[in-house]
Image (cartoon, rainbow, N blue to C red):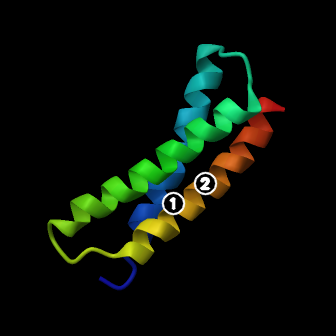
């Protein structure tokens, strides 16, 4: 599987976006650090969880997990700027 990092990236980005949007939809008071921490932790967690599931079918790839985490954290930072400021 050559482009297996795409799965990690897509799921990490979706997790970051929807975790921050969930707080916005619930009407939580916008707090920059709280939104950033929530989105980043979801992105990192989902990227590594995706790699854990993929590990059942092929070998573990640290680069896929880390690349997905980085992309998710970048999106979390952007979403935090949009929603919290």
Q: Which label belongs to residue 48? A: none
User: On screen, 20 above or below 68?
Assistant: above
Quadrant where the image shows the C terminus: top right
Looking at the image, which residue is at 27% across and 74% down?
A: 60
User: On screen, 21 above or below 11?
Assistant: above
Q: Position of residue 14 (x, y in %)?
A: 50, 48
Mark 2, other Cα within 10 Å: few <14 / some 14–19 / many ≥20: many
Q: Quadrant of residue 53?
A: bottom left
Looking at the image, which residue is at 49% across and 64% down?
A: 68
Q: Is 48 placed left or right of 78 in the picture?
A: left
Tell me how far mark 1 sits from mark 2, CA to CA: 6 Å
User: On screen, 5 above or below 11?
Assistant: below
Tag 2 residue: 73
Q: Position of residue 84 (x, y in %)?
A: 77, 31
Q: Is 14 placed left or right of 23 in the picture?
A: left
Q: Position of residue 26 (x, y in %)?
A: 59, 15
Tag 1's secondary structure? helix
Quadrant where the image shows the N terminus: bottom left
Tag 2's secondary structure? helix
Q: Position of residue 81 (x, y in %)?
A: 79, 41
32 or 54: which is nearer to us?
32
Q: Quadrant of residue 74?
A: bottom right
Tag 1 residue: 69
Residue extending farthest to the left is 56
């Amino acid at each position: 599987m050559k482009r297996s990092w795409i799965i990690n990236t897509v799921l990490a980005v979706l997790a970051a976006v929807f975790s921050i949007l969930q707080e916005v939809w619930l009407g939580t008071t916008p707090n920059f650090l709280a939104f950033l921490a929530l989105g980043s932790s979801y992105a990192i967690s989902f990227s590594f969880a995706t790699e854990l599931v993929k590990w059942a079918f092929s070998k573990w790839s640290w680069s896929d997990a880390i690349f997905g985490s980085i992309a998710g954290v970048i999106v979390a930072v952007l979403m935090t700027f949009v929603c919290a400021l």
